[in-house]
């Protein structure tokens, strides 16, 4: 049975860990056919990043 994918861009806040690096939006477990292009998000300067397409907020929680 195939894994059901989460729809893209349905949440506005995502918590990620260093194990999730590199972090991209949409996330790998999300369907991307109806979303924006995949973009990788930088976490070098802070523990927060915002997707430039959908404005989802990603927080590093380690």
Image (tube, rainbow, N blue to C red):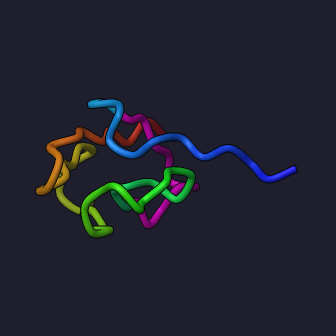
> For the point 42% across and 35% down, which residue is it?
15
Q: Is residue 46 above or below residue 24?
A: above
> For the point 68% across and 44% down, which residue is it?
4
| Viewer-proximal residue among 61 and 50 | 50
| Viewer-proximal residue among 12 and 50 | 12
Q: Is residue 55 above or below residue 36?
A: above
Q: Residue furthest right?
A: 1
Residue 36 falls left or right of residue 33: left
Residue 8 in the image, given as x and y percentages of width and height: 39, 46
Asked if residue 33 lies in the magenta stretch, the reply is no
> For the point 19% across and 52% down, which residue is it?
51
Q: Quadrant of residue 27?
A: bottom left
Residue 28 falls left or right of residue 54: right
Q: Quadrant of residue 11?
A: top left
Number of residue marks: 0
Q: Quadrant of residue 40?
A: bottom left
Q: Which residues are magenta?
A: 14-23
Residue 57 falls left or right of residue 19: left
Residue 39 in the image, given as x and y percentages of width and height: 27, 68
Residue 13 in the image, given as x and y percentages of width and height: 31, 30
Residue 32 in the image, given as x and y percentages of width and height: 42, 60
Q: Is residue 2 above or below residue 57?
A: below
> For the point 25% across and 61% down, which residue is it?
36
Q: Is residue 16 above or below residue 28?
A: above
């Amino acid at each position: 049975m195939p894994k059901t994918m989460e729809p893209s861009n349905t949440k506005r806040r995502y918590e990620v860990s260093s194990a999730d690096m590199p972090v991209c939006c949409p996330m790998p477990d999300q369907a991307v056919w109806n979303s924006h292009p995949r973009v990788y998000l930088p976490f070098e300067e802070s523990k927060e990043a915002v997707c430039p397409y959908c404005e989802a907020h990603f927080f590093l929680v380690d």
